[in-house]
């Protein structure tokens, strides 16, 4: 590119190219390498197209099935432009794996490796590379382990957060020297686990399985269990973890969702980099969508209600770039015993539901995530980065 073109204009052009070509551009000149590696460029960089990736089970022959990954371009052509993805060999090594998070174009899966080892695989979908991280000291018995993934907004360093929690709160008094939970954080640049030492959650907090990452914060649904007289009372909460300061905070739910009861009917999600709470009412076949206004007041407002008149609403899986929710539904008029679920788009204004064509008896499970911004690493010669890691697949 001509030296006569101002660097600012060059930056506007460069940030629109795919991430794989971007890596090659770093070797063109020192100026381009410095530009591409800068924090400002990394934070502003976005790929030309936003994609939605769908994971589902493809049943080849009973009782065996295979995990499939499909990438769908999220634009005006949605959902017609799609391509099947070949996942890395490291993903095939995991048993009973699930997606625990995605951030800046990195997808993190967590599952079993061998008989006893727990492992997380961080997969850069854009450049088809992945690395494995062994998750140590995974609890069993009366304890359970929650694992979350995100990218630190200040350093662009991927982190894995592990929380060990007691499954049944009543076991706290019966276990000598027990503590309700422990927290450990893995940082990709250091390749080490460590424990945060300040501003940890109160001991009465019990974490739930619903979690999401929104603009540098990990969020979990949780229950605050306080001893009142001789019994326990539970109050629903949201716990946040800042990936930069590594501090926990409590977020109050709307009053109607805070009462003593299970959080199983609640879920949390990311809607255009805003935290939303999904309140599922199976009896009424509806889902209420609540959005957090801002991180200062941390108050919620109800956006709209999702209702399906001709199908059973199983849940909201994710949101499109334009804000439309992707939902999982089941045909209520089908007489089959094993009714296949369908993936559809709900239009809040018109209340119209459109099947996107991923359904059938051989496709039983859907997990959707937004590819969003592509991750660009700038760690020591990128040895530990996902762009040029020593353990390539």
Image (cartoon, grey):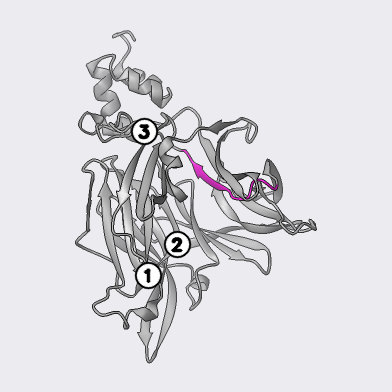
Q: Is residue 370 magenta?
A: yes
Along the line of sight, which residue is nearer the eye, 117 or 366? Answer: 117
Q: Is residue 217 left or right of residue 155?
A: right
State which mark lies toward you, 1 or 2.
Answer: 1
Q: Which residue is mark 3?
A: 44
Q: Is residue 278 left or right of residue 171?
A: right
What residue is drawn where x is 33% and y is 12%?
A: 5
Position of 181 relative to 341 (above/below): below
The image shows residue 287 at horizontal and vertical percentages of 61, 61
Q: Which residue is mark 2?
A: 209
Q: Main secondary structure of the magenta part?
A: loop
State which mark lies toward you, 3 or 2.
Answer: 2
Asked where in the image residue 12 lies, by quadrant, the reply is top left
Kindly state the secondary structure of the residue where label 2 is placed. Answer: strand
Res 303 visible: yes
Asked where in the image residue 333 lies, by quadrant, the reply is bottom right
Along the line of sight, which residue is nearer the eye, 162 or 47? Answer: 162
Q: Which residue is mark 1?
A: 141
């Amino acid at each position: 590119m001509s030296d006569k073109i101002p660097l600012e204009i060059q930056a506007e052009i460069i940030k629109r190219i795919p991430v794989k070509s971007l890596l090659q551009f770093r070797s063109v000149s020192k100026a381009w390498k410095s530009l591409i590696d800068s924090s400002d460029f990394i934070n502003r960089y976005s790929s030309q197209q936003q994609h939605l990736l769908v994971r589902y089970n493809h049943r080849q022959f009973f009782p065996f099935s295979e995990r499939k990954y499909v990438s769908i371009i999220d634009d005006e052509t949605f959902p017609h432009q799609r391509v099947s993805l070949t996942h890395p060999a490291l993903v095939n090594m995991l048993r009973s794996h699930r997606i625990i998070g995605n951030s800046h174009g990195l997808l993190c899966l967590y599952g079993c490796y061998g008989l006893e080892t727990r492992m997380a695989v961080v997969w850069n979908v854009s450049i088809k590379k992945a690395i494995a991280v062994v998750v140590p000291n995974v609890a069993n018995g009366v304890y359970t382990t929650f694992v979350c993934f995100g990218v630190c907004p200040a350093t662009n360093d991927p982190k894995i957060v592990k929380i060990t929690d007691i499954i049944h709160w009543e076991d706290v008094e019966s276990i000598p020297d027990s503590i309700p939970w422990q927290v450990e954080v893995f940082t990709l640049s250091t390749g080490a686990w460590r424990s945060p030492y300040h501003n940890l959650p109160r001991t009465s907090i019990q974490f739930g399985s619903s979690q999401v990452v929104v603009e540098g914060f990990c969020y979990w649904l949780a229950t605050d269990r306080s001893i009142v007289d001789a019994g326990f009372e539970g109050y629903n909460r949201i716990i946040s973890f800042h990936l930069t300061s590594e501090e926990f905070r409590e977020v109050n739910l709307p009053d109607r969702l805070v009462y003593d009861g299970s959080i199983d009917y609640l879920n949390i999600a990311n809607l255009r980099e805003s935290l939303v709470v999904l309140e599922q009412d199976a009896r009424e076949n509806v889902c209420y969508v609540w959005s957090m206004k801002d991180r200062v007041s941390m108050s919620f407002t109800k956006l709209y209600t999702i209702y399906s008149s001709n199908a059973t609403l199983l849940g909201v899986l994710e949101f499109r770039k334009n804000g439309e929710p992707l939902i999982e539904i089941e045909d209520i008029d089908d007489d089959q015993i094993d009714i296949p679920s369908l993936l559809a788009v709900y239009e809040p204004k018109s209340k119209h539901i459109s099947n996107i064509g991923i359904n059938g008896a051989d496709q039983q499970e859907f997990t959707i995530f937004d590819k969003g911004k592509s991750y660009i690493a700038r760690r020591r010669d990128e040895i530990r980065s996902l762009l040029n890691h020593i353990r390539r697949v």
